[in-house]
Amino acid sequence: MSVDDDRPLLSTRGLTKYYGNRIGCADVSFDLYEGEVLAIVGESGSGKSTLLSLLANELAPTCGTVLYRMRDGETRDLATLSESERRLLLRTDWGFVRQDAREGLRMGVSAGGNVGERLMAVGSRHYGRIRATAGDWLQRVEIDTARIDDTPRSFSGGMRQRLQIARNLVTGPRLVFMDEPTSGLDVSVQARLLDLVRSLVREMGLAVIIVTHDLAVARLLSHRIMVMRAGHVIEAGLADQVLDDPREAYTQLLVSSVLAA
Ligand SMILES: Nc1ncnc2c1ncn2[C@@H]1O[C@H](COP(=O)(O)OP(=O)(O)OP(=O)(O)O)[C@@H](O)[C@H]1O
């Protein structure tokens, strides 16, 4: 883990997004440090995806700032990045694992190509080495390397998510955004994927911001939890604290509905 800098990796203040008159999310502020896993939880429509898009610089805020400490140590306001700087960040120092693997993968490109493409984006040119690294990563995410030339169209839902993870992690990012990465999968497939994510996150010392409506996922993966309701953060704290001793009635309701499930 490269936690050699005690400044936050990402820092946001007063982050707000309105869609016309409707609140997407309002006045969100927090700091995220290297190696830290933050779960954003809340029911459908509470603003989780909006917040994630703002943090990942995919959506422009109505007001507020997101600061990010770049690899060179300089902290930048994401709103001031040029389009090419933004794209470079997304391809190298960040990962984004989408709920729908079809949005995070190139479905017509082989599994090896999906992983290799990110390596080429950071300057790798040697075909043999790219293929070998892609093969290593397929193994790490438990995909049979015999499938390296197959496209993800022929993969199961769980395999597609694992390939997305390999594609995102191959460049050694410091921060990975995850949007409901396990929803829509069978329970046993989910459990295996979560185990994999948890061990890779620990091994690589990744900072993760994960959006989930599933508190069991938040409990398993995260150090800290932020609870959103109607666009606002209504409760935030250490994961165990929020889940075992929720302060807000709404969080208690969320927790008890999981316990009842
Ligand atoms: N493109 C958009 N245009 C208008 N309103 C939007 C848009 N995207 C989201 N919203 C609204 O912003 C609010 C927050 O939505 P958001 O999708 O961020 O919530 P969420 O917690 O991620 O929900 P889900 O889990 O269903 O994706 C909702 O009221 C939603 O209707």
Image: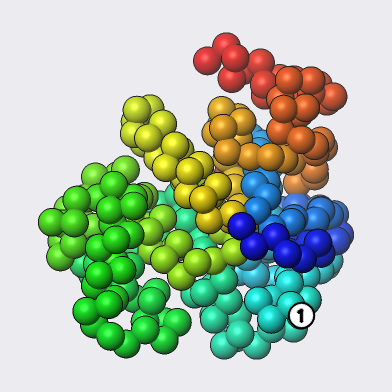
Judge left or right: residue 154 versus residue 122.
left
Residue 57 in percent (x, y) is at 65, 70
Figure coloring = rainbow
Residue 15 lies, with reference to residue 171, above or below; the image says above
Residue at x-position 73% and y-position 20%: 244
Does mark 1's beta carbon lie closer than 8 Å to ligand 1?
no
Q: Is residue 204 visible?
A: yes
Q: Quadrant of residue 222?
A: top right
Which quadrant is home to the N terminus?
A: bottom right
Is residue 78 visible in the rendered image? The answer is no
Side of 61 relative to 258 (left or right): right
x 73%, y 70%: residue: 68
The residue that label 1 is drawn on is: 74
Q: How many circles with numbers are drawn on the protein?
A: 1
Amino acid at dot 1: Glu
Between 22 and 211, the one nearer to me in the picture: 211
Q: Within the image, what quadrant is residue 3 found in?
A: bottom right
**Going 29% across and 76% down the picture, which residue do you hit?**
130
SS at badge 1: loop
Residues 119 and 6: in front is 6
Residue 91 rendering spot, x and y as whole percentages: 49, 75
Instruction: Kindly indicate the quadrant of the structure image that contains residue 226.
Output: top right
User: Which residue: 74% across, 56% down?
Assistant: 33
Judge left or right: residue 203 versus residue 58: left
Residue 18 x %, y %: 76, 60
Label 1 crowd (10 A; few <14 / some 14-19 / many >=20)? few
